[in-house]
Image (cartoon, rainbow, N blue to C red):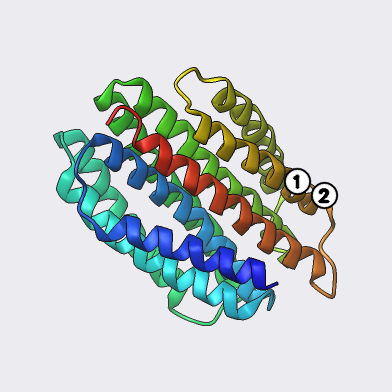
Amino acid sequence: MRRFSRALCLVLLCLSAGAEAQIADLNAAINKAGRERMLSQRMAKAYFQLGQQVDGERSRRVLDQSVAVFDRQLVELKNYAPTPEIKDTYLKLEKAWLAYKDALLGSAPSQQQGRQVLQLSEQVLGLAHQGTVQLEKHAGSTTGHLLNLAGRQRMLSQRMAKFYQAQSWGIGDTSGAAELDKARREFAGSLQELSAAPAMTPAIRDGLELVRQQWFFFDNALNQKGSADRRAQAAVATTSERILEEMESVVNQIEKLGK
């Protein structure tokens, strides 16, 4: 438990530090754009955990910290946008974010509100993904592609946990179950692609091996059915944060390739 507390703090500090500095180049922009994509799912996951009283103190901290980071990075990305098309994407994201943020923080978590959070998290994800892809195309580099791919792994880790917690709370549906299975397949396949990429340094490969180890535990947690005592939900909450910690480290290392 103490190891998890340290790991969670490290993730939160890493996310905060990454959001504090202004965007210096396209690699940094792609990294932060991908982090916005991840946070769209992480916030919903934390909301659903709060609604079920799963790891309440940490879930509240994850939600509040993620909202703050999303806010700051959105301003940076909007100001940095190198083309009118990308700028327009972030203006649209800003509008969608206002509705999502209100749903997340406007009242105590409830199943009725949770269904709206689930819907809005998909809308925000779509626009955040659009911005990330646009920035990758604008960069037109191998590093940009790898950043997008690795950054998407961060998002998938939180997306799987989001749909798991939604189903456990009774607000998921068959499409959510299908999306969870799809995300699991994509995560495993992309992990193989990243590991095989020639541009990866030994340090990044070591990081990916740690991700692979955490994936074993996270995947097993996802196989458990939600339980009345919330142990299964707590296992998903814990392992989803651990794998995010490792992926965050990998993405930050990829950002520095070629610099």
Callout 1, which amino acid?
A: Asp
> Number of numbered discs present?
2
Callout 2, which amino acid?
A: Asn
* Residue occupying image coordinates x 54% and y 62%: 44
Q: Secondary structure at mark 2?
A: helix
Q: Is residue 232 above or below residue 228?
A: above
* Of marks 2 and 1, the one in the foreground: 1
- Residue 180 found in image quarter: top right
Q: Is residue 157 above or below residue 120?
A: above
Disc 2 + disc 1, Cβ < 8 Å: yes
Position of residue 127 in the picture relative to residue 200 (left or right): left
* Residue occupying image coordinates x 38% and y 45%: 128
Position of residue 121 in the picture relative to residue 258 (left or right): right
The residues tagged by marks 2 and 1 sit, at their Cα atoms, a distance apart of 7 Å
Instruction: Bin the neighbour count of mark 1 within 10 Å (Cα to Cα): few under 14, some 14-19, many 20 and up.
Output: some
* Residue occupying image coordinates x 36% and y 60%: 70
Image coords of residue 233 (percent x, y): 75, 65
Image coords of residue 222 (percent x, y): 76, 51
Which quarter of the image is occupied by the N terminus? Answer: bottom right
Q: Nearer the viewer, residue 134 or 66?
A: 66
| Residue with the mark numbered 2 | 223
Instruction: Bin the neighbour count of mark 2 within 10 Å (Cα to Cα): few under 14, some 14-19, many 20 and up.
Output: few
Q: Secondary structure at mark 1?
A: helix
Q: Nearer the viewer, residue 248 or 103?
A: 248
* Residue occupying image coordinates x 35% and y 28%: 144
Position of residue 71 in the picture relative to residue 160 (left or right): left
Image coords of residue 103 (percent x, y): 45, 70
| Residue with the mark numbered 1 | 219
